[in-house]
Amino acid sequence: MNKCLCLLLAMFLLFPYRNMTQEEKTTKIFIDEAGQAQVVKELLSKAGEQDQTRIEKGVRQAACFWRAEDGTAEEFCEFCLNHYVVSPEKLDLLCQRLSANFETIGGHFNKMIQDLKRPLDLDMGEILPIDMMFGELDPGAHMVSDLFKSKIAFAVLLNFPYYTLAEKKVLAEKWSRKEWAYARVGDLYASRVPAEVYQKVAQALTGSEAYIADYNIYMGHLIDRQNNTYFPAQLKLISHWGLRDELKAHYGKAEEIVQQRVIYEVMKRIIRQEIPGHVINSSEYSWNPYDNTIWQNGKQVVATPEPNTRYQKFLNNFYALKEMDAYFPVLPSYILRRFSMDRELSEAEVERLFSDFISSQVVKETAKFISKRLNRKLEPFDIWYDGFKSRSAISGETLDKIVAEKYPTIESFEKDIAPILVKLGFAPQKAAFIASRITVDPARGAGHAWGAEMRSEKAHLRTRVPKNGMNYKGFNIAMHELGHNVEQVFTLYDVDYYMLKGVPNTAFTEAFAFVFQKRDLEVLGIKEDNPDKKHLMALDTLWAAYEIMGVSLVDMQTWNWLYAHPTASAEELKNAVVQIAIQIWNKYFAENFGLYDQPILAVYSHMIAYPLYLPDYPLGHVIEFQIEKFIEGKNLGTEMERMCVCGRIIPQLWMQNAVGSPISTKPLLQCAEEALQQVK
Ligand SMILES: [Zn+2]
């Protein structure tokens, strides 16, 4: 998970001249067509015909937001004449100045939010009510209105046109780097969404994130009908990440299917909201998830299910994000904004990519192959089959021991970042620089990476290191987060324009995170001399993509269902989510698994805490595979840097530059097909 997402949601869901209700658009435009035409005419006579497009777009954009309190029509005209920059050199200077100032503004707000959320994000004891209040506070919420009041936003609107995704796709090929930077200036800081609307979004997201961050299951307290326990007494796992990863860790031995089944029972109780409230984040009771009974000191206690909190949190996010719709006449739904604006890939494009992939013959064959390897029929949780990884050959205990000895503390992991990077192929100097820009903190949740927005600040890697040292699971996640952090450092420091810092969308940063995560054993110095490694990796990626595409489709359909049923109750939403998960299962999984009506695809906590984030993971898998294929036999450090310095241009162009072709599942499907023939 990349923490930046939440900031993006909270701070940058701002788009030029879309941010007004239809009513405002039609009734409150203060500078009418004639007024705009007059300004255009005067500017044209000043600047010349070659500026026509920019002048027309700029005046229209600025006029869209100009209100009575900003000045009279004459003052608008005067403002435009004074602030429209004719000379290319001066426009360049303006862009530089804006970039520097946006770095200051964005960088400090990012740091402020990061610091205020420390008690919520870091493992630093009790969360006080005041921590929640600070966590919900968005210090940047009023920035946009201030930028308008000071007329800075109008100067931006006037000089840097906004281009739609369709326009960007057409213009992308011929734009210079500078023109790209200008286009990104045109994307940002030009909206007039009321601060309280942003505040509500931040509040809802913080509430659901905090709910999930403390959603732990005490595994040692899980029992079956014979009162057997199956997990270490102290093992506490966060839902769903911890539960899923524990389930994956039990593929080494066939008899450990018992543990896997217990975990799946827990998951079903979570999804259906039947889980007793008493057992969430509490070790007071023993819980039998099979018959859903709870016990204390050998006596059965009445189990009350948690109310529909999980789905209420989802609804809270929906209400807050939907309220923004009114300010986006061109993209009047959160779904549209997530796809066409944030990802710069349409929902239909993404859905097609996923459904084609998961209904492919190769996926069917892989399911059969897994069943053969397991020597049993598939069970629903085999969507997390882990046996294509070389590490499954080594016991979990051995790996835990190696990792705990290597990283007894948070500090020991932080100190090892530069050596880790060198092991991955980064030049020592580069590795030292990157490491100097990353700091490691103890996470309350599973971990995340939170990059800096200005060059004076460091990126934060949050990870869990228990008292007796880091365990393998924690290390594996930390490697994932490190991939994010390295990308964040590269794209903040090495991209030529600040306005182009970052990657096209979160799927790209996930791709780099996966690249790192996959090399965890290499970093531990564990040699894998399996000649099938390459093929196993293809099958592993294919299976992971299959699973997470299914999960993403559930998330996407749920959002579509919510837009069709905006007044749904938490209970209705719960039923819809279960229904949708079962439908997707029955359509794409049931036949391959020989099992119908399974709700497992609805277990992801992202659906609750990170609205519509999930599709970035499968996109990440696909992109990662293309990147992996491309860097085969090349140096990871050099190639990652070369790809990252492209910055945040549109996804398909970035891919073209990075690997020589647009986003495609073909390489993965082909390699997996080949693997099925090679691996015995
Ligand atoms: Zn991630």
Image: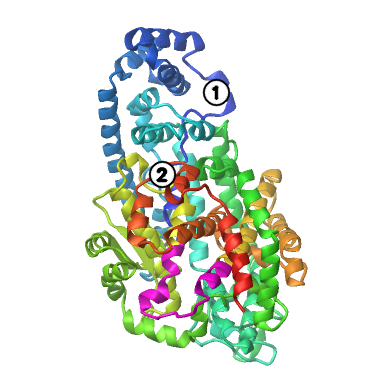
Residue beneath label 2, please? 648
**From the viewer's perspective, is 630 left or right of 114?**
right
Indicate which label's residue lies in the foreground, 1 or 2.
Answer: 2
Q: Quadrant of residue 550?
A: bottom right
Q: Is residue 278 left or right of residue 620?
A: right
Q: Which residues are magenta?
A: 514-540
Question: Residue 575: where, in percent of width, then height?
Answer: 73, 59
Pointer 1: what residue?
25
Q: Is residue 75 visible?
A: yes
Residue 518 within the magenta-colored segment of the rendering: yes
Alpha carbons under labels 1 and 2: distance apart = 31 Å
Instruction: Give the SS element for disc 2.
Output: loop
Of 110 and 94, nearer the camera is 94
**Is residue 347 shown above or below 640?**
above
Mark 1 Cα-neighbour bin, 10 Å: few <14, some 14–19, many ≥20: some
Q: Is mark 2 within 8 Å of ligand 1?
A: no
The kind of residue tagged 1 is Lys
Give the residue displayed 36% in from the left and 79% down from the top: 525
